[in-house]
Amino acid sequence: MPHVIRLQVNGDRYEVAIEPWRTLNEVLREDLGLTGTKHGCGQGDCGACTVLLDGRSVLSCLTLAVSADGGDVRTVEGLAQGRERLHPIQEAFIAGGAIQCGYCTPGMEISALHLLRRRPRPTEAEIRAGLAGNLCRCTGYAKIVAAIQAASARMSDEPG
Amino acid sequence: MSLPHFEYFAPRTIEEAVALLAGAGGRARPFAGGTDLLPRLQSGLVRAETLVDLKRIPELCAIGFDPASGLTIGAAVRLADLLDSPDVQRRYPAMTDAVSQTATVQIRNMGTIAGNVCNGSPCADSVPVLIARLAHLALMSPRGERLLPIGDFFKGPGETALEPDELLVRIHVPPPPPYTGFAFAKLPARTASDISAVNVGVMVARQGGVCGEARIVLGAVGPVPLRAHQAELRLAGATLGARLLEEVGRLAASETRPIDDLRASAAYRRDMAAVLVRRALVVAATRAGLAVADAAPAGDATGASE
Amino acid sequence: MSQKPCIGVNVPRVDAWDKATGTAQYTDDLSLPGMLHGALKRSPLPHARIRAIDTSRARALPGVKAVITSADLPRVRYGNWRFSPNTQDEYALAVDKVRFVGDPVAAVAAVDRDTAIEALDLIQVDFEELPGLFDLDAAMAEGAPRIHEETAGNVSVTREIDYGDLAAGFARADYVRDDVYLMPPVSHAYLEPCSSLAQADSLGRITLWTSTQTPYIVQCLLASVLGLRENEVRVIKPYVGGGFGGKMELRSWDVCAAFLARLLGKPVKFTQTRDEEICAGRRRHPMRLRSRVGFTKDGLLLAKELIVHLDGGAYNSMGPTATFLVGNLGAMLYRYPAYRYRGFHVYTNNPPAGAMRGFGAPQAFFVAEGQMNEASADLGIDPIDIRLKNAMHPGDKIRGFATIGSCAFTECLERVAEMSEWRRQRREMRPGRGIGVGCYSFVTGGNFNWFDTKYPFSAAEVRAYADGAVHLLTMAADIGQGSDTVLQQILAEDLGLRLADVTLYAADTSLSPKGDLGTWASRVTFMVGNAILDATRQIKEELFKVVALKFDTNVVHSFECKDGMVRVKGRPEKAVPFGEAVAMVQSLRRGEPLIARGSYTPRDMGLVAPTYSFGAQVAEVEVDRDTGRVRVTRIHTAHDCGRPLNPQAVEGQVEGCVQMGLGYALTEELVMRQGRTLNASFLDYKIPGALDMPGIDSVCVGGPEPKGPFGAKESGEGPVSPTAPAIAEAVWHATGYRARRLPITAEQVLRHLETNPTANDDRRVKP
C-alpha cells in the first residue's frame, strides 16, 4: 500500500505517495526529476548516489524513501544558489580539473560537503578517508582531493 | 536496484515493534540502517514480508553511559553516532578504532552496531571488541527481555541465537575495568577500506608488572568470531615480550578455523591472525600501562591503530 | 587587446559546470512520455543448446508489453570488425545456443522496471547443457567442442609478424630469457552502467540515445540488424560516465530497445545493473604470453619471440584488434633487431573480452618491462640504463608496420630518474621499501580500417556566423576524457577566438558530419583536431580574401586570425573583427553562410598509427613484511604526449591511468569459476579508492608532434601500462619477489618472504 511521505529536498517541500520498497534514489530521480544524483551500483558500494539526509551523507540507493519521511534532503542540485553562485566545492571541482566523466561528481561533492562541515580544515589523509565510500574511475582522485583542499581553504576564509 | 515487495511499519515504541515482529510469524525483519538488509533483500538472500523500522523509537536511538553500569547502545544507534560520542571516544578507544575502520563514511552514517552484530557475519568489525569487552545483548520478545552474553550469540555464518520473535534492543558494554587496555586491529582484504580478511579485538589486564587476564577475539577466521582461549591462558601471569607475543600469536592462529574465499585464503588468514594478535596486544598492553620488551611499534593501516 | 591563448593552458572543461551542478544528463537520466522499461533474460549457463523458450507466462504478467527472443529478430550477426565479416559472430539474442553466463536470451518491455524484472523470472528456457571450455588449453585441445560451428579448434583470429633473423639473434645472445606470463581479466568499472533509450517514428526510423563511445559504429550496425538504411537510424550520445573501451560496440540492449520501440510504438529504455556490467560487460583480455628475448652481455637486445594466446571469451568483440595490437606493441619501445610474433584469439565459454584502455599494451608491456627488469638484475645493469641502451628514437622504423615520428622516450627515462632520485634511492632504500621502473608506448589513433568505413576517419564542420559565433559539429564522443573541451580549444585558437565564441554540437549522427569512428585508440584529439584544422583552413581562406580586398593588401603579406580579428600579419591596424569578416564573405556569397567541412584520414603512415606516445614511470612501494601487503607510496611519471594542449586535462588522464594500472597490479581481478564471475560487485571487485592512491608527480616531456594538431599526440591510454610493471619491479626491489602474473597479492609476497626473508637487502648500501 502506498505511503504518503513528506520530504524537504533542497529547501523545497514535496509530498509523494510511494510504495515502501522504493528507494530514496528512485524517488529523487523518478518522482522528483532530480537526476543529478546518480545510480552507479545499487548496492552501496560506489557512492555515486550519495545525498545528505538530515545533514549526514547517506547512500540513497540503500535508503528506503519511506524511512526518510519528514527528512531534509540535500542533493547536488541544491548546492548552488542560482546559475552564478556555485558552491565553493563546485567551483573548486571545476577549476581544479576534478571532473572527468562526471558520474561520481555529485556523490563526491556531497561527501566533500559532509566532510567539510564536520572538519573545516581536513588533512589530506582525512579527505581521503572521507572519500573512501566514493569510487572514481577517471581521476585517480588526485584532483578531487586537491579541489577539496582548495574548497576548504575558501570556505574557511569566507564563513557562511 | 529492484527490491521485492514488503509492508513497512515504523513503530514508536519497543513494545509495538516487538508485537509487529511477533505477529508476523517470522516473516518480518527489523530494519535500521538497511545497508546490509537491502542488498540481501535485493539478491534474495533474505526474504521479508514486513520491515519494522526501528529508527523512530527514541529509546533505541540513545547512547548512555554510567560509570557503574557502563555503556548502553540502542539498537538504532548508528556507527557514526558512536564515533561522535564523547563517552565512547574517551573510555572505549578500541571500539572507536573498530567502528572507524568499519566500511565507509556513508555506511557508518546509516548502519548500526546492532545491525553489524545481528547480521552474524564472522567478519563484522565491531564484534571482536564487543566480545573482548564482555558485552551483553538485551533481547526482547513478547515473553520479556533476556540478557545474553555476546559471546553466546553467534551460531554460524549469518546464524545467531536470536529467536524469530526476538529483537535486539540494546547492547550493554561494561564499564572499562581498571588497569586494562583494549585494542582492535584489522587487515582489510584488498583495498584500504575493504572488508576484513582478518580482524581482532584483544584485552590485556595489568597485574603488577605482568599480564593478568587477557582476552583475544578473532574475526573472519571461523564460522563465528572466535575466542583464542589457549593463547589467552598463555598470557595470563606472563611478562610481556616480543618473543612471547610471537608465541601467543601463533597459538591464537592455531585456534582459528578459517576458510578460503574470494578475499583471502585460509592459510593466509591463519598466518595473519598471528600477526594481528601480536600487534593488537602491543597496543592493548600499552593502553593497560604494561611495557612490552623488544616489541616493534604497531603498524599503520594494516596493524593496530593507536 | 591580445587574448589569452586557448592552447597549452588549463582551460576548465566546457562540461564541468553541467557535471558539477547535476545538470548533465546521462542516458539513464532521460525519460520520454509513455516510456517502457526493458530488461534482458540472460543465460545462467556457460554453454548450452536452447531447446525451447516459453515466454507465455511472462507475456501474461500485467504490465508486460512484449517479450522477444531471437525468433522475433532479423537473423543478422554483427561485430565491430566489419572489414572481416567472418569475425562478426554475435546476435542480439542468442540463436540456438548460449555461449557464456550472461548471454542474452530474451528481452522484455514493461510499464516499469520492477515488472520487467519480474517477467524475466517467468520466461522458461529449456537448456541442454553442453561441455564448457574455460581455459585456453581446453579450448584448443584436439576434439574440443566447437563454441562457434564455423570455427574449428576455437581459434578465431591469428596474427603473425616476422622480421629480422631471429635464429641468428638468439644464436648471438649471451643471455636469453624465456618466461610465461599470465594476465587476469579485469573490468573497465566505469561508473555509469550502460543504458539505451530508443524511440521510433511513424515510419519505424529510430532515434537511439545510448552510452556509447562510437555513435557511428552503433548507427551502422544497428541499421544492419534492423534492416534499416544507415541513415534511418539516428544515434545520440548524451553525457557518458566513462567508457575506457567498454562502450564501443553495438550491444544487445541497443538492438532490443530499438526493436521493441519499433514493435510497440513507444520509447523503450534498457539500463544495465552493476552485476550485469561486471558479469557480462566487456573486460580486458586475459592472456597467456610466452616471451623469449635475447641480449648481449652488455644489455643490448638482439631478438624477441612473443607467443600470445588471448582468452577472447564467447565472441570476437574487439579481439581481432587485441590480437594485432599485442603483437605490434610487443615490438615497440625498444629496438628489436629481430622479432617474431604469433597471436591466437581463442574462443572460450568465458564472458567476452573487448577493448579496454591501452588495448593490448598493459599485457604486452608487463611482459616486456618485466623481462627488461629481470635482465637488468641478471646482467648487473641498472634498469634505467639498460632501457636507455635499447630505447627507440625518432625516425626508427619497424619493418612492415610503423615509422616512429616524435619520440622523447630517452628524455622521459632521464626525467623520471631525476624526479625520483632514482640512482640514490635504488641504492639506499631501507629494507622493506622498493623502487622500480616501467615504460610504455602507445598508438595515437589507428590507421587500420577494421570497421570498413566509407567515410573519412574523422570529420568536422565549422560554421562561422556574422555575429562572431562559431559552431563546431563533429561526431567525436567525449566520454569523460575531455575531448569536447580540447576540440573547442583547437578551433578557438586557430580562428583567434575566445572559447566562449565556440559552441560544440557533438556526437549526434544526424547533425554531425560523417563520419567519425569514435573514441578509441587515443585518436580523438589527433584525428578530429586535424579535421578541425582542415575546416578552419578553408574558413580562413575565405576570410583572408575579403580582408585582402578591403585593404588592397600587398601580395607579399600574409594574414592571420588573432585576438578576435582577421588581419594582415604584422599590421595590426589592418584588421577586421571576425564577425564582420564573416559578414563580408556571406554578403559576397549572396547570403550563403560560411561553412566548411574538414576531414582527416591517415594515409601512408604504416599499418598501425600515425604517431606514438612514449613514457616512463617510477613506483615507490613499502612492503609490510609480516603481512606481505604492498603500499604504493609515490608514482613519478614522465609522458611524451607531444604538446599538451590542456596540461591539466593531460595530468588528469595520467592520474586516472595510474589508478587503473595500480588496480591491475594489486587489487583487481575478475575471479572466474567454470565461466562464472564470482566477484560481480564493487564490494568484491576492488578498484583502488582514494586511500589506496599514492601521490603522483607527473610531467610532460618532449616537443610538438609535427603531424598532430598544435603538436599533440595521445595521453589517455599509454600511461595505463607502466604502473603494474613499475610496481612489480619495486616489489622485487623490496622483497626479491618476481611477479609473472597479476594481481600481486599480499599472500604471494608473504609466501616468498617466508622462504627468502632478507632477499635483496644485500643489494643495498647502508645510507
Image (cartoon, coloured by chain):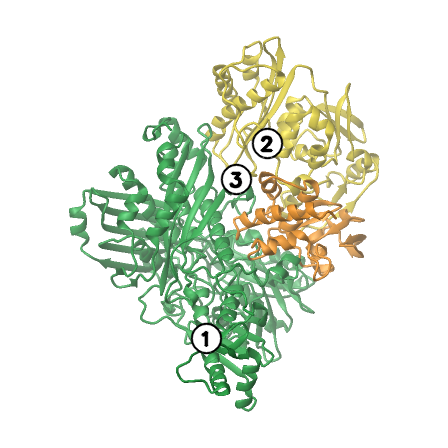
Chain colours: A orange, B yellow, C green
Q: Give the secondary structure at mark 3.
A: loop
Please report the residue visible at 59 percent of the width from the left and 28 percent of the height from the top: B224
Q: Amino acid at mark 3?
A: Thr
Left or right, C290 with respect to A140, comes to left
In front of the other: C393 or B38 = C393
Q: Position of residue C386 (x, y in %)?
A: 28, 44
Please report the residue visible at 34 percent of the width from the left and 63 percent of the height from the top: C608
The dot on residue B191 is: 3
The dot on residue B25 is: none
Q: CA distance from mark 1 to mark 3?
A: 59 Å
Quarter the C terminus of chain B occupies = top right
Label 1 close to label 3 by CB (< 8 Å): no
Q: Which chain's residue wears label 2?
A: B
Asked if C90 appears above or below C693 in the picture, the reply is below
In front of the other: C484 or C65 = C484
Please report the residue visible at 66 percent of the width from the left and 58 percent of the height from the top: C21
The dot on residue C570 is: 1
Q: Amino acid at mark 1?
A: Gly
The answer to whether one can see residue A120 in this image is: yes
Asked if B279 appears above or below B21 in the picture, the reply is above
Q: Give the secondary structure at mark 1.
A: loop
Left or right, C91 with respect to C156, comes to right
Q: CA distance from mark 3 to mark 2?
A: 19 Å
Q: Position of residue B77 (x, y in %)?
A: 74, 35
The dot on residue B122 is: 2
Q: Are marks 1 and 3 on the same chain?
A: no
In front of the other: C559 or A99 = C559
Q: Are marks 1 and 2 on the same chain?
A: no
Q: Position of residue C452 (x, y in %)?
A: 39, 72
